[in-house]
Amino acid sequence: MSCRLPVPALVACLLLTACSEPQLRQAEVVAPAAAPQAVDLLAEVRAAGADAGDVVEVAPLRETSVQDFVHEAVRAEAASDYRAAALALRQALSLSADDPELLQHSAEMQLALGVFDEAERLAARSFEKGPRLGGLCRRNWATVRLARDAVGDGAGADRAAQQLTQCVVMPPVRM
């Protein structure tokens, strides 16, 4: 007994099979890593640097070309294109290498991209070049804390959290 399908039926069956969506085997499905979301990391850093009213923040004047790159980075970050934002900030830093605000913004983009060692390095350099007090200082140490926490260095994250508390200017005692 032979089981032969008519040729047109076989061709139709093959065409329908080719048009169907491929089925994923269970082993092919990979769960994403339980890493913090970039938006959450950036929100935490920015919240740490929020104005606490403890210092007067002074924004330096920048060259127009540097400011253009900063605006480009802000637009890219708003679109969640952290790679493009990091590239624009790298170009800004090529023109103004010691700007602590640019260094910190670059550190934040590296944090969002998951390049934690570079985020920590840039935040530390920003701290060295910056005022060591106020919002920028708090953002520096929040970035270091999150980067160390992300790589499993709990003790380093705790030290960075302690340093963050040193960024607040205590008001004078008035009698």
Image (tube, grey):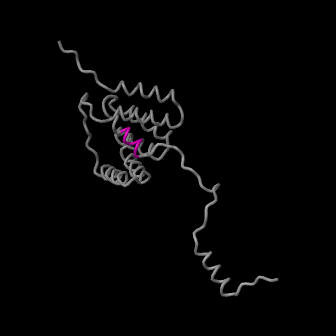
Q: Based on the displayed image, in which of its 4 quarters is residue 13 positioned?
A: bottom right
Q: Is residue 23 above or below residue 79?
A: below
Asked whether 28 or 164 is in front, the reply is 28
Residue that lies at the very extreme toward the top in this rendered image = 175
Is residue 41 magenta-colored?
yes
65 with respect to 81 (left or right): left
Q: Based on the displayed image, in which of its 4 quarters is residue 40 positioned?
A: top left
Residue name at image x 60 percent, y 67 percent: 22
Q: Quadrant of the C terminus?
A: top left
Is residue 147 magenta-colored?
no
Residue that lies at the very extreme toward the front in this rendered image = 1
x and y percentages locating residue 46 in the rendered image: 34, 39
Residue that lies at the very extreme toward the left in this rendered image = 175
Residue name at image x 65 percent, y 55 percent: 27
Which segment did they paint magenta?
Answer: 39-45
Residue name at image x 32 percent, y 30 percent: 131
Assign the magenta stretch its main secondary structure: helix
x and y percentages locating residue 61 in the rendered image: 25, 43
